[in-house]
Image (cartoon, helix red, strand yellow):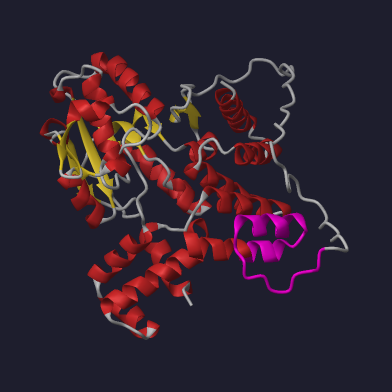
């Protein structure tokens, strides 16, 4: 039913239907049909194609922002350090330029400003641009009024410094608001920000995981065009593997997920083989219900082979998968996604089921979505590390192993 709408969304914002689940797109279409007074889907399709406003409304019904202030705080600490180091190298009068996209409801670009102010940078030394495809979230960002859901974690001292209590929420100080220029834009539109000077730092976190591979490659080229040759790019934890496979390299700042263009390596002067590379051993997950592809398990005599199972709980998904009923388990995942929306656990099960079926690219994407929603998901880290190692991306696999190790150590404190 939704194939044409999926094609529309892919062409408009690059969205890969598999990344959010087709049921999410179907639900958004139904919501917009009801809001527009349409019962017949063909009539709504004609209306959608005739109305730029309705096209934007459908995009916004699908794109549900999930963000908060100082998400991945190490990234902002790294930005402050890098900014202080870079300032003396700038030409006189040129401010430090930072880009945030997609900026959603403003928590990320405002966090950038607060981090730099708290690091001692005068307001005139930097400027932040923020871009999003949704006019609705941009209006919310400009209003700069936030509820308690935008403040998570234990370190909330910034709220005391930069916000004023307002009703049931908090109003951001004008000193911070005035440092961000919000603009509507689409990474797939030709010439995005073409009239702007390149940026010293680009934040584009947790966006690439929603694109298919060709779109990911295209968007990465746009991001590199927007970034200065000596600039740095901040991405989400689930996207590090994507950049490590391009001409980008990590700066090596723990938990910051910041990359720069890889430096050219001199050609070898000798034909002699280099030092042997140690074999990378993938970590063993805490729970490995289906760690590697294998023949379907034989059902015990006491377990009847299911024909139709309506239950979509995570326990049901696990039971079906471990009994070898992969198709039934996948259907249960789809029902869970339709009923409850995206979650780390359901994406993890999608990844395992794809892994067992030998669909490696699909499994990689689902594991990355799991880590987007739950960055220290131990099993997803382990399986994604194994897949990357098998494909020769030892550096990416090692980074995931280190993350998994840090999570175990932190939990054991």
Q: Nearer the viewer, residue 135 or 290?
A: 290
Q: Nearer the viewer, residue 298 or 9?
A: 298
Query: In the image, 268: left or right of 58?
Result: right
Q: Is residue 284 visible?
A: yes
Outermost residue toward the right in this view: 301
Q: Quadrant of residue 280?
A: top right
Above or below residue 134? Residue 169 is above
- x then y, percent, for residue 403: 56, 28
Above or below residue 20? Residue 390 is above
- x then y, percent, for residue 251: 46, 23
Query: In the image, 143: left or right of 147?
Result: left
Q: Quadrant of residue 314?
A: bottom right
Which quarter of the figure is the C terminus placed in?
Answer: top right
Question: Residue at the location (51% across, 54% down)?
Answer: 212
Segment tinted magenta in the rendering: 303-331
Question: Residue at the location (68% across, 38% down)?
Answer: 386
Q: Is residue 135 magenta?
A: no
Query: In the image, 325: left or right of 48?
Result: right
Q: Is residue 310 magenta?
A: yes
Question: Residue at the location (49% across, 64% down)?
Answer: 339
Question: Residue at the location (21% across, 50% down)?
Answer: 140
Q: Is residue 230 visible?
A: no
Query: In the image, 114: left or right of 364?
Result: left
């Amino acid at each position: 039913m939704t194939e044409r709408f999926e094609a529309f969304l892919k062409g408009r914002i690059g969205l890969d239907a598999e990344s959010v689940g087709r049921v999410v797109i179907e639900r958004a279409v139904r919501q917009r049909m009801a809001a527009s007074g349409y019962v017949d889907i063909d009539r709504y399709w004609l209306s959608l194609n005739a109305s730029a406003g309705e096209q934007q409304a459908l995009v916004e019904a699908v794109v549900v922002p999930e963000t908060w202030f100082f998400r991945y705080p190490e990234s902002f600490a790294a930005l402050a350090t890098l900014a202080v180091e870079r300032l003396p190298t700038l030409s006189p009068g040129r401010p430090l330029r930072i880009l945030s996209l997609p900026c959603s409801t403003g928590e990320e670009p405002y966090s950038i400003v607060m981090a730099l102010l708290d690091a001692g940078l005068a307001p005139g030394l930097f400027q932040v641009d923020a871009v999003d495809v949704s006019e609705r979230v941009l209006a919310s960002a400009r209003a700069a009024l936030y509820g308690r859901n935008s403040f998570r974690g234990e370190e909330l001292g910034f709220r005391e410094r930069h916000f004023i209590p307002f009703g049931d929420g908090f109003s951001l100080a004008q000193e911070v608001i005035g440092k961000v220029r919000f603009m509507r834009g689409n990474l797939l539109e030709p010439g995005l920000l073409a009239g702007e000077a390149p940026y010293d730092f680009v934040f584009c976190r947790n966006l690439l995981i929603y694109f298919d591979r060709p779109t990911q490659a295209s968007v990465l080229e746009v991001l590199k065009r927007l970034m200065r040759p000596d600039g740095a790019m901040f991405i989400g934890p689930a996207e590090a593997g994507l950049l490590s496979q391009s001409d980008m390299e990590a700066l090596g700042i723990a938990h910051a997920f910041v990359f720069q263009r890889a430096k050219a390596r001199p050609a070898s002067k000798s034909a002699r083989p280099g030092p042997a590379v140690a074999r990378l051993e993938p970590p063993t997950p805490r729970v490995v219900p289906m760690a590697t592809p294998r023949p379907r398990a034989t059902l015990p005599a006491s377990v009847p082979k299911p024909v139709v199972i309506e239950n979509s709980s995570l326990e049901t998904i696990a039971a079906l998968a471990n009994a070898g009923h992969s198709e039934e388990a996948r259907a249960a995942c789809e029902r869970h996604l339709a009923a409850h929306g995206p979650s780390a656990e359901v994406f993890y099960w999608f990844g395992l089921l794809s892994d067992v079926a030998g669909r490696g690219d699909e499994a990689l994407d689902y594991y990355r979505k799991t880590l987007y929603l739950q960055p220290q998901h131990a099993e997803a880290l382990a399986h994604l590390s194994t897949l990357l190692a098998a494909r020769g991306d030892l550096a990416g696999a090692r980074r995931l192993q280190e993350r998994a190790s840090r999570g175990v150590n932190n939990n054991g404190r």
